[in-house]
Image (cartoon, helix red, strand yellow):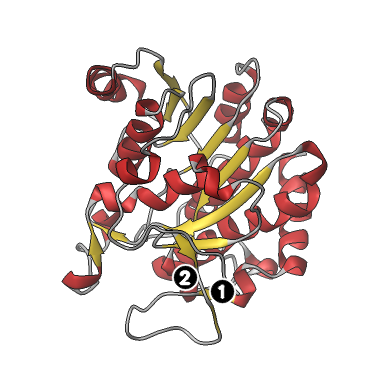
Amino acid sequence: MTFSTPFNFHSTAAEVVRGVDLHGKRAIVTGGAAGIGVETSRALASAGAAVTLAVRRPEAAQPVADALRAATGNAAIDVRRLDLADLGSVKSFADDWHGPLDILVNNAGIMATPDLQKTPQGHELQFGTNYLGHFALTHWLRPALAAAKGARVVSLSSSGHWFSPVLFDDLAFDFIPYTPISAYGQSKSACALLAVAITSRWKDDGIVSNALNPGAIATGLQQHTGGLRTPVERRKTVEQGAATSVLLAASPLLEGVSGLYFEDCNEAPRIVARPTDFSGGVAGYALDPGNAERLWETSLAFLA
């Protein structure tokens, strides 16, 4: 039986967080000043959390932070620089964090970059940004997460994971011909596997972790794809798109729940073939414990 909640496709982040008290909690939202990251940050701040917007361009994010403070009445919203594509930047961010961390939302991402590009450390750019940067951030923040005694790590995957499992033998497309959507798919499968590995490895620290597909939302993410291809009736507003992230990050309904993949505010069903009707679901390879363990060990080696 899949895990279900009273919320659904149409629910908004504000509805999910209504009545939730996050005063005294500290949260980081990567990419928290754009797209659904703004709404995720808004909802967490409105419930009383101190929220850090971890962004690549702090100067562009400051006006967003100002607007969020005004809208929520919460002054505890700050901006810090984080370039997920550069592991040096990730390490600096983690080293500068002090004290417990209750909520980490691995939200930022890029999609379908047209040409094969590499990070400063030589990783394929989508894998490096969407997954490896978040893995490193989460790994290096483990002491802060453990100190919170009940921290939640939320990782944004996507229905795009249907287009590729993790290509362990050629993560950087040195042999396999590069295609934008395959690289994106690999990175989003990896994000789902991160939640599985954290659940297995860090349960004694009291850290829980889940992954999600936010749905089809028109944001800057689609700049290389020509916009959404999803049927209009399956598209969400930004407020609806942030709902599942906020549910996993903040709702008491998710207390102790870990290692699952959600969409539309409920656990997604397992599927055995890629849907052609935009009906949703999660591929088995994106939640496979063996894949999760192999990816974790591979990722650790990249940080050495």
Residue at image mark 2? 182
Task: Answer with left or right where residue 174 lies relative to residue 300.
Answer: left
Pointers 1 and 2 in contact (C-beta within 8 Å):
yes
- Circle 2 — which element? helix
Based on the displayed image, in which of its 4 quarters is residue 293 positioned?
bottom right
Based on the displayed image, in which of its 4 quarters is residue 73 positioned?
top left
x, y percentage for residue 38? 31, 36
Q: Hey, what amino acid is under mark 1?
A: Ile
Query: Mark 2 packing: few (<14 Cα in 10 Å), some, or many (20+)?
Result: many
Q: Hey, what amino acid is under mark 2?
A: Ser
Quadrant in which the C terminus is drawn = top right
x, y percentage for residue 1? 60, 75
Q: Distance between the residues labelled 1 and 2?
A: 10 Å
x, y percentage for residue 230? 24, 72
In the rendered view, tell whether residue 6 sits above or below residue 181: above
Q: Residue at x 47, y 70 (%)?
A: 182
Q: Which of marks 1 and 2 is nearer the N terminus?
A: 1
Q: Residue at x 71, y 61 (%)?
A: 292
In the rendered view, tell whether residue 297 sits above or below residue 268: above
Closer to the camera in the image, 222 or 116: 222
Task: Answer with left or right where residue 217 lies relative to residue 178.
Answer: left
Residue at image mark 1? 176
Q: Residue furthest left?
A: 232
Task: Answer with left or right where residue 22 lies relative to residue 217.
Answer: right
Q: Which mark, residue 42?
A: none
x, y percentage for residue 294? 77, 62
Q: Residue at x 32, y 63 (%)?
A: 9
